[in-house]
Amino acid sequence: MDDEQLFAEIADERRRLADQLSGLTDEQWATPSLCAGWTCRDVVAHLVMPLVVSTPTIVLAMLRSFGDFDKANVAVTAKVAQRYDDLAAVLRDKADKRFTPPGNGPLAPLSDIVIHGADIRRPLGLPSTTDPDRRRTVLDFLVTPKASRGFTDGVAPVRWVATDLDWTFGDGPDVRGPAESLMLVMTGRGIAMADLTGDGVATLT
């Protein structure tokens, strides 16, 4: 896909997630997500943050955090969570915004919304609405060196095999599982290990 198509995919994925979130109860919003230390509401605030916060504000937060992006991200995300009552509506309204992190193209925000969507849906028991081709695109990105900046610590030397897509990558013992579970494990969500099979699983653990 070219950049125009990728931005269209990002906007659609944001709207799909926003539609699912629009009817959540306060208890559901407060449910712990798959992101350690963050509730589902916190994760949505993180997705909304680059769509509503100016670059100078993020740079200032970085300076206050002595260049630690993770700390700056947590601080600015917390302010977004406090500022907006209806985060689902903001995510929908800002769906077409074309933000990309410095040094990355649209594959980064596409991966962000797809993976964080799973971080929210899984604990809430919501079905995934992500298109299979979109999952394949994210998997293709996660196994690249560029994804090691912010998404992975590199991928294990195994043969990754998606059982619900025509997608494989790598050499070595097989690690088989649904595409979403592969994405979650590649990005450090150990809870999805239970979905994987194959001789390569021992390598991952």
Image: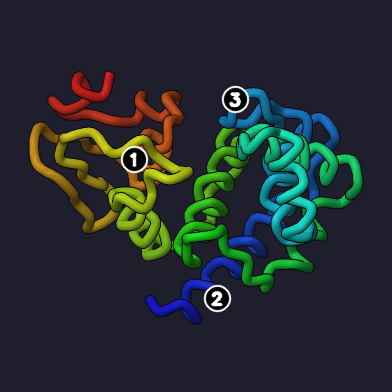
Find the residue positioned furthest to the left: 172
Q: Amino acid at mark 1?
A: Leu
Q: Which residue is rendered at x = 16% and y = 35% of the image?
A: 158
Q: Which residue is rendered at x = 68% and y = 71% of the image?
A: 97
Q: Earlier in the sequence, mark 1 or mark 2?
A: 2
Height in image: 25 above or below 47? above
Report, in whole angstroms, how far the alpha carbon at label 1 lies from the one at label 3: 18 Å
Q: Position of residue 164 (x, y in %)?
A: 29, 51
Q: Earlier in the sequence, mark 1 or mark 3?
A: 3
Check whether the beta carbons of the residues at disc 1 and disc 3 lie within 8 A of each other.
Answer: no
Height in image: 25 above or below 4? above
Q: Amino acid at mark 2?
A: Ala
The image quadrant where one finds the C terminus is top left
Q: Amino acid at mark 3?
A: Ala
Q: Which residue is rendered at x = 74% and y = 64% of the image?
A: 92
Q: Residues within 10 Å of mark 1 (few under 14, many from 20)?
A: many
Q: Residues within 10 Å of mark 2 (few under 14, many from 20)?
A: some
Q: Position of residue 194 (x, y in %)?
A: 36, 24
Using the image, tell me which numbered label, if any, was put on residue 8: 2
Mark 1 lies on residue: 182
Mark 3 lies on residue: 36
89 sits to left or right of 3: right
Report, in whole angstroms, how far the alpha carbon at label 1 lies from the one at label 2: 24 Å
SS assignment at label 3: loop
Q: Residues within 10 Å of mark 3 (few under 14, many from 20)?
A: few
SS assignment at label 1: helix
The quadrant holding residue 91 is bottom right
Q: Position of residue 185 (x, y in %)?
A: 37, 33
Q: 72 or 126: which is nearer to us?
A: 72
Q: Earlier in the sequence, mark 3 or mark 2?
A: 2
Check whether the beta carbons of the residues at disc 1 and disc 2 lie within 8 A of each other.
Answer: no
